[in-house]
Image: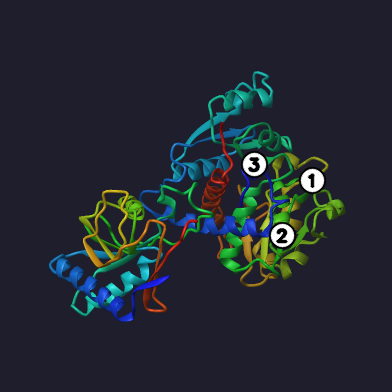
Amino acid sequence: MRTVLDADALRAAVEQLSDRVADAMAGVPRWALVGIRSGGVPLADRIAARVAARGLQPLRGDVDITLYRDDLYTGLEKPVLGDTDLPFEVGGCGIVLVDDVLFTGRTVRAALEEVWDFGRPAFIRLAVLVDRGHRELPIAPDFVGAAVRTEQSDRVTVDWAADRVIVETRRTP
Amino acid sequence: MKRKDMLGLRDVAREEIQEILDVADQMREVGRRRVKKVPPLRGRTVVMLFFEASTRTRTSFELAAKRLSADTLGFNVSTSSTAKGESLMDTARNIYAMQPDAVVVRHAYAGAPHMLARAFPWSVLNAGDGINEHPSQALLDMLTMRDRLGALEGRTVAIVGDVQHSRVARSNIYGLTTMGAKVVVAGPGTMCRSELRGLPVEVRHTVDDVVRDADVVMMLRIQRERLGRAVLPSAREYAAFYGLDLQRLERARPDVVVMHPGPINRGVEIAADVADGPNSVILDQVTNGIAVRMALLFLTLGSGEEATA
């Protein structure tokens, strides 16, 4: 196990990410920060706080993508459903999807499909704290905190409580 | 939950009931969206096999399947081959040849869904078999109770009416007891015999008795077919002795939860102002029914056991 972002680096990454989002959204009349459960939710909260300091007040929502996963009956041991809450009109609204780690892109694909069931957004942008590579779909982030090199079999965790991002290597014998 | 069917609550463990209720809880949000559809059962086929009349249970199951993106097929017994004398197994074989993933079955004979579950690899959901069980109804009842009361452990639930012949009562008794609640039943002696001791309930005969200490009072529908026969003399007499009216309700706890599986006979087992009053959760039961049936379809069809070959 190795720490790829310590407390200082994590804070800097969140600030940089939030600044980039704020720069891009400055003139947008109606937009929302939408966290992808569960890792994206605390990140979206932090971004919301930082952009508020820049005078921006986006709408706020969260989505749980469990029912939209492409591996629902094959990959998961037991699906645990979380809350999806988009308490605003999605039609015509700019959406900034937020997730902590971007990997294959399948989670984002599921989130896109889910958001579409609520209405036709004006646009969707993607903000991620860590881009760990190994994309399996043509999905790219618009805003990134940090890029980290990993193996396919690694496990990347953003530990907000301990203020760090760690990578666990799983060695196959 | 790792079972391909939901046939009854008699042998369902506490953790499984918990899981079904938790998933149902989450499924409710789908019903509040504009586009009331999520993808898990996309392209799967769910057949409604109703050999007994039903509007609400059948509609509820159909909506549940459609909200999970499944396709549904209705089998109407009055115009079907059963009227022409086809046996249950032959009907099932013919339907199985259309490759459905699940069948929702309501039948006059207890055990019919169980037979269909054993004979074919599809998922079978029991929508009521004779006077045996009606598990989805009991589960939606428990979800509704949980909403109002929090945990069901230690609660007292009173079921009033023709308990003897009620599959709703039976499933509720099994489920509630598993979740740690206490069930007391009351009704006329002809409908609530002491032999009910086969079930884990306390049998009383006065409604006023059970209403006083209960957290939940569930009124069962008096089946009009039974009125005027030896089982029960008249609707008015039933209402006088066993119906839930405002006067009786006053003897209950102020926050008692009043339930009814529907359809209600206003003025017989339940007074109009009680059914429409603040203690009544009858309409919530209907909303919760769709969510519970979504949870059952989701869990049985995703149980990991292959549905069709």
Write down the residue under mark 1. Answer: B233
Query: Residue B223's image quarter?
Result: top right
Q: CA distance from mark 1 to mark 2?
A: 35 Å
Q: Is residue B50 above or below residue B243?
A: above
Q: Are marks 3 and 2 in contact (CB under 8 Å)?
A: no
Say if labels 1 and 2 share a chain: yes
Q: Amino acid at mark 3?
A: Asn
At x 57%, y 29%, the residue is: B76
B231 sits left or right of B153 in the view? right
Viewer-proximal residue among B7 and B213: B7
Q: In the figure, is residue B24 to the left or right of B204? A: left
Vertical comparison of B278 with B232: above or below? below
| Chain identifier of the residue bearing label 1 in the image | B
Q: CA distance from mark 3 to mark 2?
A: 19 Å
Looking at the image, is B35 positioned above or below residue B93? Answer: below
Comparing B269 with B143, the one in front is: B143
List the residue tagged with mark 2: B178
Amino acid tagged 2? Thr
- The answer to which quarter of the image holds residue A33 is bottom left
Q: Secondary structure at mark 1?
A: loop
Is residue A120 visible to us here?
Answer: yes
| Residues at discs 3 and 2 both on one chain | yes
* Residue B222 shows in the view: no
Instruction: Name the residue rendered at 58%, 23% in the picture.
Output: B79
